[in-house]
Image: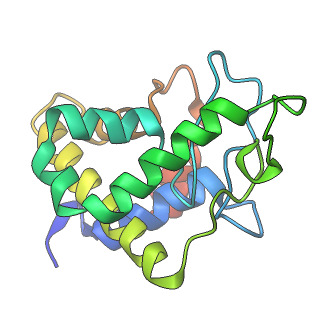
């Protein structure tokens, strides 16, 4: 398996992101608990894939999206439900599965494998785009997290701690 940086492969990187994102939860297959995120958040699953990230790949890296179209379309639809029902208990048709901390549609074991494959394909693409930057690892983490090290130093620490860096 190809390494991304140091001696770390995609499995290591996925696990580091999972540790940083949902490592403290007994069930990582949930919508984010960050219910006060400005504008809302659709982050879901062990590495907290967002609807916005999926849309970015749909619009800009279509081959990655298309190679994972089954799970990508499913997660994209779920993200729309998250956006609609988040913090909206009084809304007609409200279902707590789609609210913050909810389990969403509930993925099958096969879909969980597809989720991981899709995440790793996105991570590989992000690494390819960041590996030649001045600080490639930090740029790579920022591309996934969506926040700089100054905005969320604890996240970067968790990621790097997992990898023993």
Q: Among all residues in the image, which is located at the extreme bottom?
A: 109
> Looking at the picture, how far across and down is residue 111, in whole percent?
45, 74
Q: Residue at x 35, y 42 (%)?
A: 54
- Residue found 79% across the figure and 48% down from its top: 95
Q: Is residue 108 left or right of residue 100?
A: left
As rendered, which of 8 and 120 lies closer to the eye?
A: 120
Residue 134: tell me if it is visible. Answer: yes
Name the spot of residue 63 as percent of width and height, x first: 10, 51
Residue drawn at point x = 29 percent, y = 67 percent: 10
Residue depicted at x 37% and y 37%: 53
Q: Is residue 62 left or right of residue 11?
A: left
Could you say which quadrant of the image residue 146 lies in? top left
Q: Position of residue 120 (x, y in %)?
A: 30, 62
| Coordinates of residue 105 in the picture (x, y in percent) | 62, 61
Please name the colour scheme applied to the rendered image: rainbow
Counting the numbered discs, the total is 0
Is 41 in front, or is 2?
41
Residue 35: image quadrant is top right
Which residue appears farthest toward the top when viewing the image?
A: 38
Q: Hey, which quadrant is residue 39 in on the image?
A: top right
Q: Is residue 164 visible?
A: no
Q: Residue furthest front?
A: 92
């Amino acid at each position: 398996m190809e390494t991304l940086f140091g001696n770390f492969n995609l499995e290591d990187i996925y696990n580091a992101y999972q540790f940083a994102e949902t490592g403290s939860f007994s069930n990582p297959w949930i919508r984010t608990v960050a219910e006060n995120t400005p504008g809302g958040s659709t982050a879901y699953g062990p590495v907290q894939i967002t609807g916005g990230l999926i849309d970015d790949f749909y619009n800009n890296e279509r081959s990655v999206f298309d190679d994972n179209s089954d799970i990508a379309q499913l997660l994209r639809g779920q993200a729309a439900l998250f956006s609609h029902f988040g913090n909206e208990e009084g809304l007609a048709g409200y279902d707590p599965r789609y609210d913050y901390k909810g389990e969403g549609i509930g993925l099958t074991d096969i879909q969980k494998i597809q989720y991981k494959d899709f995440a790793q394909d996105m991570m590989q693409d992000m690494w390819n785009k960041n590996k030649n930057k001045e600080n490639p690892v930090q740029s790579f983490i920022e591309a996934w997290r969506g926040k700089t090290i100054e905005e969320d130093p604890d996240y970067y620490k968790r990621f790097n701690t997992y990898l023993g860096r």
